[in-house]
Image (cartoon, rainbow, N blue to C red):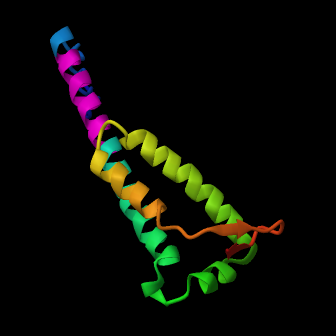
Amino acid sequence: MPLLTPNTPPAPPAPQVPSAEQLERQAVQQVRQIKNKTLRLVDQLSSQWAEAFDALWVSQHDGDVAARLAALGTDAEELMTRNTALVTFMLTQLTGEDQDKVDFINAKLATIPAFTVANDGSVTLD
């Protein structure tokens, strides 16, 4: 007779298959979470955009928008292009959902002074 007997682990329990009702409840909950996360993401994005917008366009930060544009050099055009794409995305997401934010973004955009983008990508105020 052997001194040690092999220890056979117990068989795992049979997996429980969720009911159709449970699956539907889970799907509804997941969709709600996705929608909430997406809305929060757009809120966070619009807040951060507003901070960056003010840092560039609002003179109170260091008193000279032209100097900030000059410091961007040839990267200024890329910034303007990305800003346009970002604003388009935010307005698309917010239109019909949050008119106050749409109005806030449009009001900020209306304060941008006229500017010119040079062939080298630099931006100067008109």
Determine the residue positioned at 35% across, 57% down.
104
Q: Residue at x 47, y 61 (%)?
A: 110
Which residue shows up at 65% across the image and 69% down it? Answer: 115
Extreme residue in the right direction = 119
Furthest toward the bottom, the residue is: 62
Say whether residue 10 is visible: no
In the rendered structure, the answer to whether residue 116 lies left or right of residue 94 reads right
| Residue positioned most to the top | 20
State the quadrant of the C terminus. bottom right
What is the span of residues highlighted in magenta in the rendered image? Answer: 22-37
Q: Position of residue 33 (x, y in %)?
A: 26, 37
Residue 3 is drawn in which quadrant?
top left
Q: Quadrant of the N terminus?
A: top left
Residue 125 shown left or right of residue 110 in the figure: right
Give 117 or 21, whichever is nearer the viewer. Answer: 117
| Identity of the residue drawn at 44% across and 73% down | 54
* Nearer to us in this view, 107 or 11: 107
Q: Picture coordinates of residue 82 (x, y %)? A: 61, 56
